[in-house]
C-alpha cells in the first residue's frame, strides 16, 4: 500500500505547530527529484518557546517516578514497532534507502528506546562508608535540558539515539532533526506524544541549522549538546558549547579501513565487505571505505568484490528487490563524482561503476577502484557514498600504518582467522568500533563512538546514558 507523505510540523510544548514565521523549505524525493512537501523554519520566538517548555518539562520529568518514565518510553517503542511499515515508506520517500532497510532502521530504533528505558532503572549512584556519624553519597542526576542535532542518513536511528538516552536519563530535549528528511522524525516524536510524554519534555524544531544551534547552545536553559554529523560542523558546535562550558557528545565522520589478511578466503571476505559497503548507498559514518588487502589475495578479492557490486540492483527504494537507492541529495553525488574523477586523473583504475547513471534522481553506480594513490582525496576524505577503493599491502605493519594514518578514528574492520593477527589488529587499530570477519552495524547493547577527530562521548550500551547524567557528591553528617 502506497503511503502519502505527511505534513511536516514542529512539536513545541506538547503541540504541533507550523511556527510563527512564514519561512519554508522544500523537501525532495531523492529518487525522483520531485518536491514532497515543505518543512517549516523556526523563528527565534519559536526557539524561545521551546526553551521555556524544555525548562518546565525538565522540572517535571526529572522528578517523575522511574516506573512512569519507563512505561512511557516502552509504550513509545511499541507504537514505533506497530507503525514501522508506514514510517519506513515515509523514510524511503524522503531519504531514498530501500524500504526494507528503512523498516529495519525503524525496528532498531524501537529497540534503542527499549534498551534505554530499561537502562534508566540502572543509573545507580553509590554510598561510601565513612564512620558511624557520616556518610558519602554519589548521586547520578539528569544533566538538564538537551539540545540535539541530527543528520539525514539515519532519519529514525539518529534522532532516537538522542531522544531515548535523554528521556531515559530524566532530561528534557529540543531536537533539530534534518530538514532534508523531516517527516520520519515527526512520526518518531508522534509515537512519544501518543505514549503520553508530558508537554515540554520533548520538542522538535526545524530551520536554519546555524540559527538554531547558535541560539540553543548559548541559552542558559540548555545543559548538554548532542550532535551527529560531519567533523567540520562537529568542531564548530563543540566550539560553541566550549564557550559556555557545556558538555557534549560528538558522533562525527569516519573513513573506515578494512584490513584483509591472506589467511581468509578472498571471495567470502569480498562478499561480506560488499554486503556492508553499499548499505544506505555508503552514506554511513561507519561504512567500510578503504580496503587494504594482502597483495597475495588482492586480485581474487577485487574480482569477487567487483562481481558482487556490479550485481546490486540500484533504483527507487520503494520498488521491490532494489538493493541500493539514490544518494540523499545532489551535494553527495557531486562530492562522490569529484573524488572518483580526481582519483582517476591520478592513475586509479575504475573496475566498475564510476558514474552517475542517466535519468532523474541522485543515483550513483556502485563503484570499485584499484591503483588509488595513498595521497588521493578518495583515500584521505570520507567518501560517504557507494565507492570502494582497494589497495594492496605486503607487510601488516604497513597496512596498520595506512589504516591509522588519518585523523578519523570511528570504525575499522579486519578479516583474518589467525588469533595472533586478530589480537594485534584489535590492539593497534585506532578506532572506537572494530568488527572482525564481518561488517558489524550498531547494536543497542554496546557503545558506538570515535577516536581522534571522529568525536567524543559514546552512544548505546550502558555508556550511552553517561553524557546525559551528572555526578553529585554528598557528604552527610548525621
Ligand atoms: P554538512 O557538513 O553541512 O552537514 C552535516 C550535518 O550537520 C547536516 O545534518 C546539517 O544539517 C548539520 N549542520 C550543518 N551546519 C550546522 C549548524 N551550524 N548547526 C547544527 N547543525 C548543522 O554537510 P552535508 O552535506 O549535510 O553532509 C556531508 C558530510 O557530512 C559528509 O561528508 C559526511 O561526512 C558527513 N555526515 C556525517 C554523518 C555521520 O553520521 N557522522 C551523517 C551525515 C553526514
Image (cartoon, helix red, strand yellow):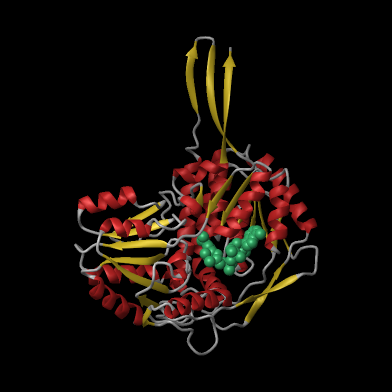
User: Can you see residue 185?
Assistant: no
| Residue 381 located left or right of residue 441 | right
Displayed quadrant of residue 271: bottom left
What is the quadrant of the C terminus in the image?
top right
What residue appears at the point 69 percent right and 60 percent down from the top-left corner? Answer: 210
Q: Nearer the viewer, residue 466 or 124?
A: 466
| Residue 476 located left or right of residue 10 | left
Ligand 1, seen in the image, is in the quarter at: bottom right
The residue positioned farthest toward the bottom in the image shown? 358
What residue appears at the point 30 percent right and 80 percent down from the top-left corner? Answer: 307
- x and y, in percent, of residue 217 in the image: 68, 49
What is the tally of numbered marks visible in this picture?
A: 0
User: Can you see residue 334?
Assistant: yes
Q: Nearer the viewer, residue 369 or 325?
A: 369
- x and y, in percent, of residue 223 in the image: 65, 43
Q: Nearer the viewer, residue 345 or 425?
A: 345
Q: Nearer the viewer, residue 67 or 186?
A: 186
- x and y, in percent, of residue 350 in the image: 38, 81
| Residue 58 located left or right of residue 461 | right
61 up-or-down from 409: above or below: above
123 up-or-down from 341: above or below: above
What residue appears at the point 66 percent right and 50 percent down from the top-left corner? Answer: 240
The residue positioned farthest toward the top in the image shown? 132
What residue appears at the point 40 percent right and 72 percent down from the top-left corner? Answer: 278
Amino acid at each position: 500500500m502506497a503511503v502519502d507523505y505527511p505534513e511536516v510540523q514542529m512539536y513545541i510544548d506538547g503541540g504541533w505547530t507550523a511556527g510563527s514565521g512564514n519561512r519554508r523549505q522544500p523537501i525532495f524525493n531523492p529518487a525522483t527529484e520531485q518536491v514532497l512537501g515543505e518543512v517549516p523554519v523556526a523563528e527565534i520566538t519559536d526557539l524561545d518557546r521551546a526553551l521555556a517548555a524544555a525548562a518546565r518539562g525538565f522540572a517535571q520529568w526529572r522528578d517523575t517516578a522511574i516506573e512512569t518514565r519507563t512505561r512511557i518510553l516502552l509504550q513509545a517503542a511499541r507504537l514505533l514497532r506497530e507503525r514501522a511499515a508506514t514510517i519506513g515508506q515515509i523514510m524511503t520517500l524522503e531519504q531514498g534507502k530501500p524500504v526494507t532497510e528503512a523498516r529495519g532502521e525503524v525496528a532498531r530504533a524501537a529497540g534503542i528506546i527499549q534498551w534505554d528505558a530499561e537502562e534508566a532503572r540502572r543509573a545507580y549512584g553509590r554510598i561510601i562508608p565513612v564512620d558511624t556519624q557520616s556518610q558519602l553519597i554519589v548521586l547520578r542526576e539528569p544533566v538538564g535540558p538537551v539540545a540535539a542535532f541530527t543528520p539525514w542518513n539515519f532519519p529514525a536511528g539518529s534522532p532516537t539515539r538522542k531522544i531515548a538516552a535523554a528521556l531515559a536519563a530524566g532530561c528534557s530535549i529540543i531536537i533539530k532533526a534534518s530538514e532534508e528528511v523531516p517527516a520520519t522524525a515527526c512520526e518518531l516524536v508522534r509515537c512519544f506524544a501518543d505514549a503520553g510524554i508530558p508537554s515540554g519534555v520533548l520538542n522538535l524544531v526545524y530551520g536554519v541549522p546555524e540559527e538554531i544551534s547558535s541560539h540553543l547552545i548559548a541559552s542558559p536553559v540548555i545543559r548538554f549538546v548532542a550532535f551527529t554529523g560531519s567533523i567540520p560542523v562537529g568542531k564548530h558546535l563543540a566550539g560553541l558549547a566550549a564557550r559556555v562550558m557545556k558538555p557534549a557528545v560528538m558522533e562525527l565522520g569516519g573513513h573506515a579501513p578494512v584490513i584483509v589478511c591472506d589467511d581468509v578466503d578472498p571471495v567470502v571476505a569480498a562478499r561480506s565487505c560488499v554486503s556492508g559497503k553499499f548499505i544506505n548507498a555508503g552514506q554511513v559514518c561507519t561504512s567500510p571505505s578503504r580496503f587494504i588487502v594482502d597483495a597475495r589475495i588482492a586480485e581474487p578479492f577485487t574480482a569477487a568484490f567487483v562481481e558482487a557490486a556490479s550485481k546490486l540492483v540500484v533504483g527507487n527504494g520503494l520498488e521491490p528487490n532494489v538493493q541500493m537507492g539514490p544518494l540523499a541529495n545532489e551535494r553527495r553525488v557531486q562530492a562522490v563524482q569529484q573524488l572518483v574523477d580526481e582519483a582517476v586523473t591520478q592513475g586509479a583504475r575504475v573496475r566498475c561503476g564510476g558514474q552517475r547513471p542517466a535519468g532523474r534522481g541522485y543515483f550513483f553506480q556502485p563503484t570499485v577502484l584499484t591503483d588509488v594513490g595513498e595521497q588521493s582525496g578518495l583515500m584521505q576524505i570520507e567518501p560517504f557514498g557507494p565507492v570502494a577503493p582497494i589497495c594492496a599491502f605486503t607487510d601488516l605493519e604497513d597496512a596498520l600504518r595506512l589504516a591509522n594514518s588519518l585523523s578519523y578514528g570511528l570504525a575499522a574492520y579486519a578479516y583474518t582467522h589467525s588469533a595472533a593477527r586478530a589480537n594485534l589488529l584489535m590492539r593497534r587499530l585506532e578506532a572506537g568500533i572494530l568488527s572482525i570477519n564481518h561488517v558489524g552495524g550498531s547494536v543497542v547493547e554496546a557503545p558506538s563512538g570515535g577516536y581522534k577527530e571522529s568525536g567524543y562521548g559514546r552512544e548505546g550500551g550502558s555508556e550511552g546514558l553517561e553524557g546525559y547524567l551528572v555526578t553529585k557528591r554528598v557528604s552527610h553528617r548525621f
